[in-house]
Structure formats: C-alpha cells, structure tokens
Amino acid sequence: MKWAKDNPDLFAMMEKTRMYVFRNLDPEEPIQTSGYICNFEDLEIKSVLLDEILKNPEHPNKDCIIHFDIRSLRDAQAIVKEAGIAESSQFIEENSHPRLWRLLAETDLQKLDLHTAEQAFVRYKNYQGIKFVKRLHNLQSEALRQAEVAVYFGKFEEAERMYLDMDRRDLAVDLRMKLGNGFRVVQLLQTGSGHGDDSLLEQAHNEIGEYFADRQKWANAVPYFVQGRNHERLAECYYMLEDYQALENLANSLPENNKLLPDISHKFVTVGMSEQAVAAFLKCNRPKDAVDVCVNLNQWSKAVELAKEHNMKEIGSLLARYASQLLEKNKPLDAVELYRKANYFFDAAKLMFKIADEEAKKRTKPLRVKKLYVMSALLVEQYHEQIKNSQREKVKGKTSEATSALAGLLEEDVLSTDSRLIDNAWRGAEAYHFFILAQRQLYEGYVDTAMKTALHLRDYEDIIPAVEIYSLLALCACANRAFGTCSKAFVKLESLENLSPDQKLQYEELALQIFTKHYPKDSKKSDLDGLLEEGEGKLPTCVATGRPITEYQFWMCNICKHCVQAQEISNYNFCPLCHSSVAY
C-alpha cells in the first residue's frame, strides 16, 4: 500500500495482480498489473516490475518501470481533449488538483489561449508559467508564439525549424546556445552571416570543447579550445595530456602578467619542471615564487642566481635551514651536495671535512676516507677559483692578473676562519694516500719504497693514529731489514700514552724477539739517515711512488698541485692523488 504524497485522501494498494486506488475509502476500478508500487504523486502511480528485473539484475530495462494515471486524471484528459475550455475548467474546478490545473494550462498553451492558460498557471501556483504567458502576450507574431510554446514543451527541432522559416536564425542560435549544443550552433553560423558571429563562434567552439572535456576526451577538446581562444581550459587539456611542450609554448605566447601564468607555473611544479615554472613566474613578475620553486625542487644554484639578480637576501637562511634539516635526518652528504649546487663551496668543504674526520675516527676503509678528504679538498679548490673569479669581475680597469690574484687571497683571508681548510686542504688526502700507497707497495714486494713512503706518514699524526703509522713503519722497516728505523718506530710505539699496558707489553715482547736476533742498525745508512733527519725536506714528493723528486723536470697536477716524476706519469691517465685527468 502507498499513500499519495500530495493528497491525504488518496492511496493505492495491491491485491495479487490487481491495483486498487481509493479516494476517501471509495475504490476505483482495479488495474491489472504484477508490478510493485514505487511512488504515488501527481495523480500518477509509478510501478516497478521487480520479477522482470531480477531475471537479469545486471542489465535492468527501463520498460520495467510503468506509469499509471488514476481515473480523475484520465477523465480530465478525455474532457480537455474532446470538450471545450469551459467544460474542462468546470470539471477541474470540481476535482481541483495541481496536476489537473497543469494539464489545463499546457493544453491552453498549445491552443494559444493565453488568458485561460494564465489562470490555470495561477491555480497551479507556477510562477515561471505565469511569467512565460506574460512574455507570450508581448509577442506580436503568432508564429513566434507557437515557436516559443514548442520550446516550452521541449520540441526543439520543431522550434528551430519555425525560427528558420521566420528568418530568425539568431533565435535558433540562441536556442542551441542555451541547450549547450555547440555543434549545431557552428552549423547555423556557418550557413548564415551576421554581426557578432565571431564571438558566437568562439563561444560555440568552447561549448564543444567542454563537451569533450567533460567526457575526458582531452585530445578532441584541444582544437576547439584553440579556436575558442580559451587559454585556461587549453592549459588544463595540455596538462591532462601530459603535453608539457605545448603547455610551455602556451605560456610563452601569453602576455606578461597574464593571470593564467601562475596556474601554469604550478602545473609545471607538480611534475618537477623547474625551468619552465621559473620562466612562467618571472614572466608574471613573481621572482619570490620562482625562488621558492627552485628551493622546493632542489635547484639551489638557480635559486641563488635568481636571488642575486633580484636582490633577495633570504637565500642564505633558506640554505642553512634546509641543510640543518638534512643533517637532522642524518643525510650529511645531501647537505654537502646542497651547498655545492648553490656554489657555497666553503660551507660544503667544511661539512665534507667534518664527515671525513668522523669516518676516519670510525676506522672505516682507508680508501673511502681518502675519497672524502679528496672531495673536501676539491671543494676548497673550487672555493679558491670562485673567489678569484669574483675578484676579476670586481677589479675594473687595466690591472694585472697578479693584482687580481692578490685581491682574491686577501678576501679569502678575510672570509676564512678555518686556516686548515684554506692552507692545508690536501693534508688529509695526502695522509691516507701515502698510508694506502705504503701498504700497496709492501704487499707487492717493494719493501724499500714502502718504507720510504711510510716515513712520510710521521708528519700526519694529527690525522692518522700514531699507533697505525708507526706499526706500519715498523713492519715496512723490518721487511726492508732497516732495523735502525724499525727500532725507532718501536720506541715511539712503546712511548704512546694512549696504549693500554697490555698493548705496550706486546710491543716490548715483539721488539725483544726482533732485536735479540738483529742489531738495530740500518743497512743503507746514508740514504735512510737523510730521510730520517730531513723527512721530505724541501724537495717535492712523488705521489705515485712516495720518493722525493730530485730532477728538475716533473709533472704537476693542475688541480691539486702535487707532483709526479716525469718517467712515472706516463703510466697514469689520472692524477694518483686527486684522480683528475692527466690531460686536464
């Protein structure tokens, strides 16, 4: 059973395959149907054939929904169709219901009986209908009234035909524009001519573009948005199609400070295209946003460049903040890369030296530590070059290169607070280079060369633990049968304060075993004594062999400024210390 939503005196009920409608508990004649009552409103009953739907629930059919008119509506339709307006009005007055007044109003509209239609709309309480009838009153042409009525009843094809017959193509275009039928608008405009056709064509093309865009057919929508000059929707289509080249071309074609440029910039940011995003932001005079883009996408060198061009001062604080975040996340190498990309080489070098020192304390692989120290020194060299270049740009007029270099050194002296980084940048790399080289020579059987290389390590006790230096020196000297040098190394080991008593005892026992069999004296006195007394002396040391260079001709690396003997460098393609190309 179902009560009518708009009349408390009406309800419908089913009895097997018969449907009864009751008005004030008086039943109407039954209707044969096997449907289930769904809705009862406006003197109509909506019924659903559930049995038919459940036969194929995945593919329901609209025919399974049936509408039934109750008797009063059927009688009113018959009277309105066959009898006159007076009789129809009298019947509906006696059986007053909004649905019946709507029926009378629509029938009178079709007959263009505007007076009666207006009264029916008043009784129906339809304000829009009343306004429509009043508008029809103001139309002088009968044909135009008929066309408007056809539009009211949704007969658009018929109404368009009437407009064209009256030579009112403009009304036909307006009708299709209201319906959003851009295809038909374009056809109508192309078959006729008139003022304002260009703007209407653009609007129609935009309607077609929206039609395809709503269905996510972006490629089909693009040409229509181009013809409609709808840059905003065109940018959206290019973005959805991932046609970023077309999106960049669109941004380049827009005038400066166009309101669409920031939106295009944000689209580029979402896909990581920093260069295009920056160009768009700069075109709309928003350098701060351009710098933020570079920061967010880790393009720090570009961010610094933009900040300098537009006299921004906050880039230093941004770098420091981001670097601190990376350090908090235990990503020191990322922080070094951050400073390096931003051309803050001195800050990168300080951080890299710190990393190298920490790795050295952990006693990790010497080769890894050497690489870290080399990277630190290379950053310092880049810092030197940066200072010199900046001074060359600042010094104007005819000044000598020596004057420019001197100015760079003076500025380095002012800016630098860590003399170790500036003056001894390669010291850590040298220490671990000779440490690795001595062991390699020892294992390859070049014991004399290994010992001479190990002797250089005595100058690097602040970098490599002394116990490792003198243990290696003692080993190399013993293998080279230079027991005098070996004895001095053991004396140094036994005097180290940071060794435990057990360790010292082990060194003493080992020394006793060696020197009870061998007298603590070197077999090559002159050569070894000179090395022991002078160490490196004033002669440059070959980083390939560890031997002092006594010849006048030798090769010097352009990067690290370290030397290699002329006969040795032919065996290398890269510098043994900094690994830069020999042909650099």
Image: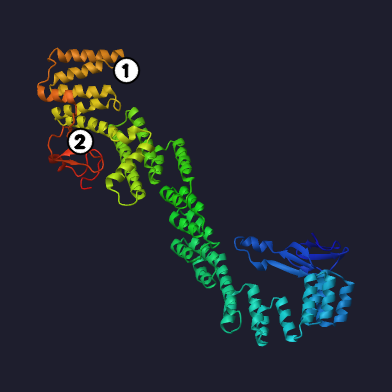
Residue at image coords 58%, 81%:
189
Residue at image coords 50%, 57%:
281
Q: Is residue 455 left or right of residue 109?
A: left
Above/below status of 467 relative to 431: above
Q: Amino acid at mark 1?
A: Asn
Of badges 1 and 2, nearer the viewer stands 2
Rounded to the nearest angstrom, the CA distance separating label 1 from label 2 is 31 Å
Above/below status of 381 relative to 39: above
Nearest the eye: 379 or 309: 309
Q: Amino acid at mark 2?
A: Val
Q: Residues within 10 Å of mark 2 (few under 14, many from 20)?
A: many
Q: Residues within 10 Å of mark 1 (few under 14, many from 20)?
A: few
Nearest the eye: 53 or 258: 258
Counting residues from the start of the chain, the first of labels 1 and 2 encountered is 1
Q: Which residue is mark 2?
A: 543
Tell me, yes or no, if residue 524 can be seen here: no
Q: Position of residue 440 (x, y in %)?
A: 20, 32
Q: Position of residue 421 (x, y in %)?
A: 33, 35
Residue at image coords 47%, 45%:
315
Q: Position of residue 29 (x, y in %)?
A: 83, 69
Q: Is residue 234 left or right of residue 97?
A: left
Q: Which residue is mark 1?
A: 498
Above/below status of 355 relative to 302: above
Quarter location, residue 276: bottom left
Q: Is residue 514 left or right of residue 494?
A: left
Tell me, yes or no, if residue 549 can be seen here: yes
Q: Position of residue 560 (x, y in %)?
A: 25, 40
**Number of marks in picture:** 2
Secondary structure type for disc 1: loop
Residue at image coords 45%, 65%:
249
